[in-house]
Amino acid sequence: MSVVTLKINDIDVAVEAGTTLLDAAKEAGVRIPTLCHLDGVSDVGACRLCLVQIEGIPKLLPACVTEATEGMNVTTETPELQEYRRMVVEMLFAEGNHVCAVCVANEHCELQDVAIEVGMDHTRFTYRFPEREVDISHPQFGIDHNRCILCTRCVRVCDEIEGAHVWDVSGRGPAAKVITGLNQPWGDVDACTACGKCVDACPTGSIFRKGTTVAEIDRDRGKLDFLVTAREEKKWTR
Amino acid sequence: MDWSELIEIAEQERNAQKAIRVHCCTSTGCQATNSIEVKKRLVAAVKEAGLNAEVQVVGVGCPGLCGQGPIVEIPSEGLQYQKVTPDQAESIVSALQNGGEADALQGDPNHPFFSRQVRIVQENSGKIDPERIEEYLMAEGYQGLHHAIYEMTPAEVVQEITKSGLRGRGGAGYPTGLKWATVAKMPPGSKYVICNADEGDPGAFMDRSVLESDPHRVLEGMAIAGYAVGATQGYIYVRAEYPLAISRLHKAIQQAKRKGILGAQIFGSPVDFTIEIRVGAGAFVCGEETALIASVEGGRGTPRPRPPYPAVSGLKGCPTLINNVETLANIPAILRKGADWFSNIGTDTSKGTKIFSVTGKIRNTGLIEVPMGISLREIVEDMGGGVPGGGKVKAIQTGGPSGGCIPEQLLDTPVDYDSLKKLGSIMGSGGMVVMDDSTSMVQVAQFYMEFCRGETCGKCIPCRAGTVQMYQLLTKILNQQATAADVEKLKELCGMVAATSLCGLGQTAPNPVMSTLHYFENEYLELLQPASVRPSNGKVPVRPS
Ligand SMILES: Cc1cc2nc3c(=O)[nH]c(=O)nc-3n(C[C@H](O)[C@H](O)[C@H](O)COP(=O)(O)O)c2cc1C
Ligand code: SF4
Ligand code: FES
């Protein structure tokens, strides 16, 4: 095993050769915001939140896919980088239909967390209010495309860990969206094993377990009545 | 077949030549104006006149002046006819037979449009029949490949290309020799050569023309590259919108295989090289090398972060050399005539020639191959003949959606990679659009942004969402609904998208906006809302209807 040493925000760190800058930063105790990165699956460098500045390299590079090399001098926070990160998050909020107050993931949402982290309190961009679909054809899960940020974590989790490759991306640019099967309703896709890994991978409330969304609570009032009757009349069947 | 047999074929072909060749362009541009029928009628007229012994009618590739097609040329007589109709065929042949003027629009083959050109890549375009390997052999074809395999080591070939100073013609101008050396130095094993014939820039058709006019030249360039870097398999990635180029490539590959020039044991040597065609569905982003490789592998055409560069890890994870059509088409000539000959053409940092497709508000539209270092003014005014109707050139757009606009006062700039870059544009793949006084530069910027907005692959956020936001701002400005703050926001977006996008598409998408903002900011400011309707006093502004 060979080791490389580098500086991240002036902190010296030594890591195994082949370590990404993102992991090296973790080791140095430096936090870099991410969205498309997910521990355990491959990295794609798509969200651009983890861009860092490296001395001697004119381009900003994504920490999640850049390997640490000997003597690197990395800066993760500059006014410029902070501004770019804020703009990325602002673009995401303007791009989809993100309404936190009625979202399953409210307060458990990485998009929300990142927005707070980069100090975004409003978006300077025009909201696009796109028309997007909700697919609840699957018996256990649903996907609300309004909340999708196209990080492709579901695609990678399903392909690389579950090995089912139910998810993929179709379309270009503004028309790009994640699809199930051959762009079929999720419930019709035989390849889906209903393992739920995509639910765990999704950073927002886009992919969710049914029965957990706002206004989906289904109360069993009869149960109370049954319990009282059962206790009093010793009748245990409903 | 060994070399002496091929020389023999070339010799036979030369001896079979008739005294007079009548060239009729059969490329896409002229086909669209009925050149196939013109050719048929020419053949019939020659037969009718009893000239079959002296005259042969040859369907050739593109002579360049596509806007004036169909083009018929009789080089031995110094004649050129433009916009030829089938009915004029007889008169052209009878003028040939009896002297006198033909009843057809006569062009001037010595016009600066032709005389200022230096043709390396297009040396055979418009001169040989692209569907017959015999004509390519007659034009010294495949001599470079033979020379490389039998008289040079692979390392010497790489050195020769490095010495020539050739740089990539696909846009970025990366030194070709350096790229070859990188792939060659990777440990032996599976390696690939890919020819990038995706050509997605709106208005560009240089690569199509090369493939249609001289397909064997590209195959030869690829085979030389394969020998130099140690690859035995090559792919040509060409867009489905180029059916004629595809069919001519298929034909050329078959002919070369049959003659033992492609496949196993080229010219009887131990060198193998096979070429296959991959047809792309025409997404602009699939011209980006990593997206192209994903598409060849059968995946969705999306770019991935580099490094690793394809030279290190490309197709199927193997070292892959990827070069543009025009880059590869330069190779045979360099090997035949030597690196010193090539590096004498052009400027210090940009060697050789470049093909441009000149379009827009200009008299002579078409393809020109010019030496690097020629001034833009020479191209536009002398060769292109200026704006039709005597209008004034306002700006020139080079580099397509990744390039910028160069204003009239800077037209004396020499055409080379570095000078164009300094002006905020790029050489690009060779699109050149001339704009006159009636063109709104904001509209130009909006046009290119609309293109990028539709062609971004959608993988990374800055490009996917940023191009939409920039397009909206440009539209708002054009609708005269914007304020100075919107222009500021547009500038911020340009900087951010350029700095943070994953691939070249996003990184260069703001260029048309930035360059028009730089040279023509006034046009933007004139479109802003008048100061009187801006909320300066806290009152709600009244919008003019
Ligand atoms: C969005 C985008 C589109 C591109 N399109 C093309 C193309 O159509 N043809 C081409 O040869 N290169 C294209 N390129 C450049 C290629 O990525 C690559 O640099 C080139 O093929 C390398 O060949 P060269 O070194 O011979 O120029 C494109 C690049 C980007 C970023
Ligand atoms: S810059 Fe644009 S085209 Fe390139 S990866 Fe990002 S979204 Fe796709
Ligand atoms: S986490 Fe690195 S680009 Fe998204």
Image (spheres, coloured by chain):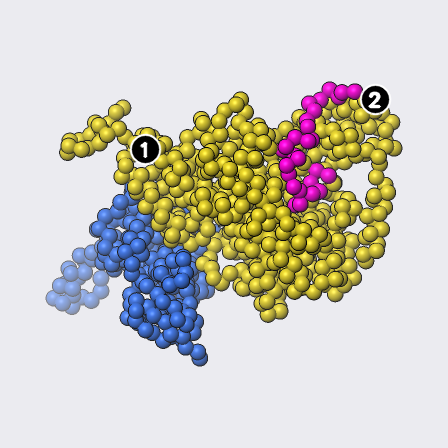
Magenta stretch in the rendered image = B100-127
Crowd rating for badge 1 (residues with CA inside 10 Å; few <14, some 14–19, many 20+): some
Tell me the residue that label 1 is attached to.
B525
Helix, strand or loop at mark 1: helix
User: Which numbered disc, 1 or 2, marks the residue that appears first in the sequence?
Assistant: 2
Please name the color used to draw chain B: yellow
Q: Is residue B366 left or right of residue B529?
A: right
Residue B415 picture location, percent across and down? 54, 42
Can I make out residue B333 in this image? yes
Front residue of B166 and B25? B166
Q: Colour of chain A?
A: blue
Residue B449 visible in the current orientation = no
Q: Amino acid at mark 2?
A: Asn
Q: Chain of mark 2?
A: B
Q: Residue at x 81, y 52 (%)?
A: B6
Residue under mark 1: which chain is it in? B
Q: Is residue B74 left or right of residue B417?
A: right
